[in-house]
Image: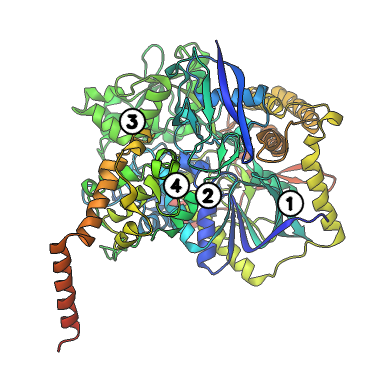
Amino acid sequence: MADYETHEHDVLVIGAGGAGLRAAIEASAAGAEVGLVCKSLLGKAHTVMAEGGIAAALANVDERDNWKVHFADTMRGGQYVNQWRMAELHAKEAPDRVRELEAWGAVFDRTEDGRILQRNFGGHKYPRLAHVGDRTGLEMIRTLQDHGVHRGIDVHMEHTILSILKDGDRAVGAFGYERERGRFKIFRAKAIVLATGGIGRAYKITSNSWEYTGDGHSLAYEAGAELIDMEFVQFHPTGMVWPPSVMGILVTEGVRGEGGILTNQEGRRFMFDEIPENYRAQTADNEEEGWRYCQGDKNARRPPELLTRDHIARCIVREIKEGRGSPHGGVYLDISWIKQKLPDAAEYIKRKLPSMYHQFKQLADIDITEQPMEVGPTTHYIMGGIHVDPDTQMSRVPGLFASGECAAGINGANRLGGNSLSDLLVFGKRAGEFAARFAKDNSLGKIDSPSRTDAIDIIAREALAPFESRDRGNENPYEIQKDLQELMQDKVGIVRTESEMQVALEQLKKLKERANRSGIVGHREFNPGWHTALDLKNLLTVSEVITRAALERKESRGAQFREDYPNKDEKFSKVNTMISKADDGSMRIRLEPLPEMPDYLKRVVEENG
Amino acid sequence: MNVQFKIWRGDASGGAFQDYTAECSEGMVVLDAVHQIQRTQANDLACRWNCKAGKCGSCSAEVNGMPKLMCMARLSDLPLDRLVTIEPMKAFPVVKDLITDVSWNFLVKRRIKPFKPRPPDAPDGTWRMQQADIDRVQEFRKCIECFLCQDVCHVLRDHQMHNKFIGPRFLIHVAALEMHPLDTEDRLEELRNAQGIGYCNITKCCTKVCPENIEITDNGIIPLKERVVDKFYDPFGWFWRWLKRRQDRQRLNPV
């Protein structure tokens, strides 16, 4: 084996957003020596972009809230294909995780009596989101980062992992490179936590940054873990659509939580046109009641703008398709209208939604206190991911844990806004705790047998192949990525159909061939062309997984809408799609029955119908 | 329309500006142009970015000599009849092209005493704080750590006093901790000595470049300077604390 710089840790956490940081803190608190790998600089992960808030049944604003209501809301939002145990743990533990952030210095907005303020959000029965204006993610990541850096966690910034190293069945390390010098490194660890976030870069219109190339999904898949629910990609209903350069940038659901309304070209509040059966009892049937809800009237039901994201995204697509969209191919989101209701509306909007105000003013020349915004769906989140034990967050690969967006189960077919930040905290903590425990019970695995060292050398050689561009055909990796994004957007997007997805599978094969011919200029030191070429492998893997899972689920449920199977099908109501790598290297897909929900939780669901 | 750019290319050993042309459309920001050039003409052009919406503070650089987030710098706000120059921040060592080594900032933060809350106010382990009492702290906590204020601060940029002065970013970090209603730690001694608050002579350059519009100087640094002065230079205050300490000692160890 070539000579690689080697680091040893008890627990290696890959990914430094909310879940990774929380896992690192917990493992460190349990006495483990922790290494934390960030793809970017510390504190820049996508958690920083989260805006609206952290969902937790603190019951500070509405005393009727409790974990049971939160659990029932989460299951209903996920169309009951969630892993019930994760949804249960999440609802029960989220309040403690939020209070813990306050103890570590987070400064949430306050209620009149000085407690943590909570706001309304889609699919949540009561005001539940602890928040800081519309920059909650920044508050969360900074609090975790500042708390974490005083714990002696060893932070490896601007590193990317290429492969999980195994000793027999067990995960015992990772192999990757550091961006600055382009050198390869080996990380040996007794336990590994994947917390790499999402796959948004597989799509053209996305709120995700360059980092979200499905690394954890792909690493786990290659290492032998199973991926579930990968067909469920969340298209957030409100991304910016104009100007073109900002297309996809997120507009927080908090705008609607504060009273923002969706209208079409004709000025009609089209969300009243179609209210799903299972939400009808909870949803206002007139505009006046909706406004009262936003103002805290406990007898009012929530406006249809606060239905779940999957439904709203589809309604927006319908309006645009039927010719009632805004000039730049979106619909209108209007918060300025509240000046009819509130005397100091402009100030209120600036105080509650400062970064939205700033973002539109600076990037689109729109004053949201005066004018409506133009918005349309943007790829935001993947509900699917690594299948883990709900309590410990360990995958079926011993020693390999996962938490946050790259793990799956809590969200089912659709995630409620605000449940992601709480997911990161609850399951980040659990992953850290159980990874530390695993590390205590196990010693460092072996990575030095000849077959293993050869395997590492092969990964290194493959990673360097784009530099041999003349022999390979010199395909520009940026162009391959762009073509992939367009393919997934067009063929495996919000509205799906068998024939188009079959075309996508064929095209993905061709893109894989092109990726093998990708060539780059320059040298190994901080070369984004090279990094883009290396990320293609993961992007192509997750794109294929998403497509195959979407083909397998021949029904429409939550975020998956099949034009050829437009309704829910009982046959798919109690299964997850599960994909793993077969011995011959092919993708094996099967329908895995969901664990049976225990009676006490069934009652909770019924009581909160 | 075509716009001409001059982008600094090179590494720690040296470099030079290179000319590029990008096709620019409505609404584009500098980062879009950099990405277009990267995709079509210079695949290995190094720059940092993440959120592309002014929230993560990764894409800091100097555009026409002004420290800016490239993702929030609209091309339409620049004079496009001239070359647009883009170069890395000057207060930190260059790694490659537009990337600088900002690791010093992370080391500085680790040396600042962490948050230390008073005991919880309520039996359930929670605290009570009024919104009015946290508005200022929330202003400081808007900081996205883009380090543009560090870049423009002459103590760091021109005098390179990184070992004696923590810079506006971390004075604001200390201010957010010191003014946090729950915090009980005292950071004034370090502020005066190791962290070198005295080197700031309030030219307000940091405030001018802050993309989050934090009033760094007026709301953060000046009140901190006042606290330091009160503690270390005010003779009445000094005498009062001396008296109080003596009384405390006498109470604890009565003669």
Q: Is B172 left or right of A162, judged from the image as shown?
A: left
Give the quarter of the figure containing the C terminus of chain B. Answer: bottom left
Where disc 1 sits, the SS reads helix
Q: Which residue is mark 1?
A: A223
Q: Please name the amino acid that badge 2 sits on.
A: Ser
Q: Which residue is mark 2?
A: B103
Q: Please name the amino acid that badge 1 sits on.
A: Ala
Say whether marks 2 and 4 touch (CB < 8 Å): no
- The residue positioned 46% from the left and 57% from the top of the image is B110
Q: Position of residue A407 (x, y in %)?
A: 60, 48
Callout 2: 10 Å neighbours few (<14), some, many (20+)? few
Is circle 2 on the same chain as circle 4? Answer: no
In three-dimensional space, the C-alpha distance between marks 2 and 1, rounded to whole angstroms, equals: 33 Å
Is circle 3 on the same chain as circle 2? Answer: no
Where disc 3 sits, the SS reads loop
Q: Please name the amino acid that badge 3 sits on.
A: Ala
Q: Earlier in the sequence, mark 4 or mark 1?
A: 4
Q: Which residue is mark 3?
A: A284
Is circle 4 on the same chain as circle 1? Answer: yes
Is circle 1 on the same chain as circle 3? Answer: yes
A471 in relation to B138, above or below: above
Q: Which residue is mark 4?
A: A72
Where disc 4 sits, the SS reads helix
Chain at tag 2: B
Chain at tag 4: A
